[in-house]
Image (cartoon, rainbow, N blue to C red):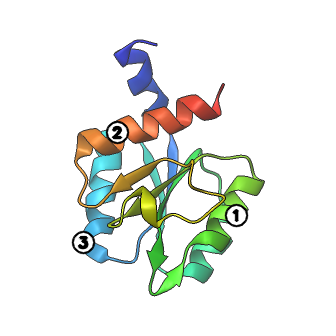
Amino acid sequence: MSAEANDDLLNGARVLVVEDEAAISMLLEDMLLDFGCTVVGPAARLATALEMAEGETFEIAILDVNVAGEPIYPVAEAIVRRSLPLVFSTGYGGAGIREPYRDCPVVQKPFSQADLKRTLIGAIAAARK
């Protein structure tokens, strides 16, 4: 797939953002808008994130692994039940991800715009296969 076709995967994509740190949330929103995405949320609390994961329309989710001291896994489970792709965002890298989610893509904080874009495109492309 060409780089241009890859960029088209993000253009218009609805992305659920779950992040409790305001500065990171705003940075994520800015990056996603630069990619042509529509931001769903952001959700800063687990209960809100779970409601959005079950009821909102989106193509992919970016989930902070620890939201206000609570693990994000109930939200990840809801997204997987809907057969939608997700990307974890964490300062601990892939080693901090629990089973059965270890194979999910991870962006390690702090991440660059290029890292985020590459990870999102890879996750969306893999989900469409």
Q: In the image, residue 66 lies at what x, y percent? A: 46, 76
Dots 2, 1 in contact, CB < 8 A: no
Badge 2 is on which residue?
A: 117
* Disc nearer the start of the sequence (2/1): 1
Q: Residue at 38% of width from left, 26% of height from top? A: 7
39 relative to 54 in the view: left or right: left
**SS for callout 3:** helix
Q: In the image, residue 71 lies at what x, y percent? A: 54, 78
Q: Residue at 55% of width from left, 49% of height from top? A: 104
Q: Residue furthest front?
A: 95
Residue depth check, mark 2 versus mark 1: number of the one nearer the observer: 1
Query: What amino acid type is highlighted by mark number 1?
Result: Glu
**Number of numbered discs overlaid on the protein picture:** 3
Task: Write down the quadrant of residue 76 in the picture.
Answer: bottom right
Query: What amino acid type is highlighted by mark number 3?
Result: Ala
Dots 3, 1 in contact, CB < 8 A: no
**SS for callout 2:** helix
* Disc nearer the start of the sequence (3/1): 3
Badge 3 is on which residue?
A: 23
Residue depth check, mark 3 versus mark 1: number of the one nearer the observer: 1
22 relative to 6 in the view: left or right: left
114 shown above or below 50:
above
Give the Cα distance between marks 2 and 1.
23 Å
119 relative to 47 in the view: left or right: left
Task: Write down the quadrant of residue 37 in the picture.
Answer: top left
* Disc nearer the start of the sequence (3/2): 3
Residue closest to the eye, 12 or 117: 117
Badge 1 is on which residue?
A: 77
- Count neighbours of disc 3 (C-alpha within 10 A) and say few if under 14, some if 14 to 19, many if 20 or more: few
Give the Cα distance between marks 3 and 2.
19 Å
Query: What amino acid type is highlighted by mark number 2?
Result: Lys
